[in-house]
Amino acid sequence: GGNCYDPASLLFLEVAAKVDGYPDYASFCRDLEQAEKGRCYRDLAGLDEAIPGQDSFSNFRKRVGHSVVDQTMDIMVQFIKSGTKPSQQVVYLSPEAVTSAP
């Protein structure tokens, strides 16, 4: 089978987990699966029924590259924490980067 989750949704969830101070995927995924606690994350990430687990995040990082995810996530977290909007910098994951295998 193919990749089940939109890369933008997984990246959003990575950023949300970091901003909200989750120490690891296990604790974030546990909350993500809870009906009420995870609803906001799921709604903002555009997830309907299927909920990614730890393996989904690990596979996403392997497909895209750990450094690409970390760099993109760091930029997004800086924007969120500073309250500024990106104006000159554009963060973009090309479909080729997400779908190609190393």
Image: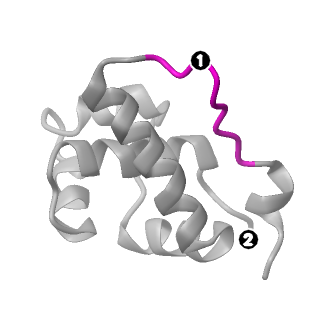
Query: How many other residues sit within 10 Å of disc 2, few (<14), some (14-19) or many (≥20)?
Result: few
Q: What element carries label 1?
A: loop
**Cβ atoms under marks 1 and 2 closer than 8 Å:** no
Q: Is residue 68 above or below residue 47?
A: below
Is 56 left, or right, of 26 in this rendering? right
Which quarter of the figure has residue 96?
bottom right
User: Which SS does the magenta portion mostly show?
Assistant: loop
Q: At which x and y percent is residue 65? A: 62, 72
Task: Using the rendered image of the protein, determine whether residue 94 is visible from the camera's viewpoint.
Answer: yes
Mark 1 burial class by Cα count in 10 Å: few <14, some 14-19, many 20+: few
Please give left or right for residue 9 compared with residue 100 in the image. left
Bounds of the magenta span?
85-93
Which residue corresponds to mark 2?
1
Residue 87 shows which numbered tag? 1
- The quarter of the picture where the N terminus appears is bottom right
Residue type at mark 2?
Gly
In this view of the protein, can residue 50 be seen by the observer?
no
* Residue 30 shown in magenta: no
Residue in view at x 51 percent, y 57 percent: 71
